[in-house]
Amino acid sequence: MSQSAIGFLDLSEGEEPGSEVTTHWCSVAYWELRQRVGRLYTLHEPYLCIFQDLPHGNGLSLSLVQEPTSVDCVKRTREKIGLGLVLSREADGVWLYNRSGYPVFVNSPTLDNPSSRASVVIKVNPGYSMNIFNYDMASVLRAVKERHCLDGPYDPTSIRISFAKGWGPSYHRQFITSCPAWLEVLLNVNR
């Protein structure tokens, strides 16, 4: 694999020359609190860099879709996004690499405890990576997940990622919609 211009491994190197990816593998929505900001970003490439603002960046620049805000917690969190993160589609699942100077927090169906109703939120520290959606585990969960155990709507292919702020039973914020800046990743897996 070769290094791309922005310092990441070129994940598309093994593809046939001239081959064209016709379907997307995920869509990404950026949210501030309960408000979606910008359009739904559809991803065909094997990876996506999501960042606040870079002088020479290739990917989704959140600063280009954000509106001016008077909400202090949103302003402070925007400043912490920095280099952001990389989402990468690999053979075993979807990986996240945290390039930010602050932790990101992740919830995914394949990270949840299958015998619990509570969603698990995992902290990914700066400089660390994690498989945030395991394809094999997702197949097992689809086969065994009992719908009557769930409270409210459930999307087995949706990942939520919050910048710098956690949520859930262990945090001040109980719901991701209380987080100042977050992503919703909608995977195109068996849809």
Image: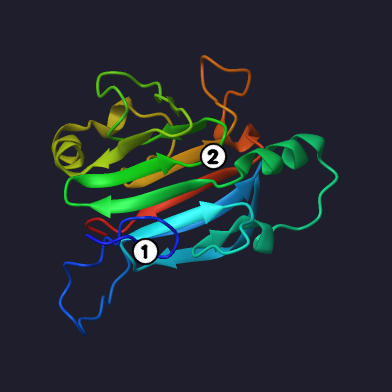
160 vs 61, nearest the viewer: 61
Q: Position of residue 159 (x, y in %)?
A: 40, 43
Residue beneath the point at 61% across and 42% down: 81
Q: Quadrant of residue 66?
A: bottom right
In the current view of this chain or complex, which residue is farthest to the top? 170
190 vs 7, nearest the viewer: 7
Q: Position of residue 168 (x, y in %)?
A: 52, 22
Badge 2 density bin: few <14, some 14–19, many ≥20, Cα 10 Å: many
Badge 1 density bin: few <14, some 14–19, many ≥20, Cα 10 Å: few
Left or right placement of residue 130 versus residue 165 in this view? left
Residue beneath the point at 63% across and 18% down: 172
The type of residue carrying mark 2 is Ser
Quarter holding the N terminus is bottom left
Q: Quadrant of residue 147?
A: top left
Report the number of discs: 2
Residue 155 appears in the rendering: no
62 vs 25, nearest the viewer: 62
Q: Is residue 117 above or below residue 13?
A: above
Q: Which mark is residue 126?
A: none
Left or right placement of residue 149 versus residue 161 in this view? left
In the current view of this chain or complex, which residue is farthest to the bottom? 18
Q: Is residue 71 above or below residue 118?
A: below
| Residue marked by disc 2 | 100
Give the mark toward the camera: 1 or 2: 1
| Residue marked by disc 1 | 4
In contact (CB < 8 Å): disc 1 and disc 2 = no
- Disc 2 element: loop
Q: Position of residue 89 (x, y in %)?
A: 28, 54
- Disc 1 element: loop
Q: CA distance from mark 1 to mark 2?
A: 19 Å
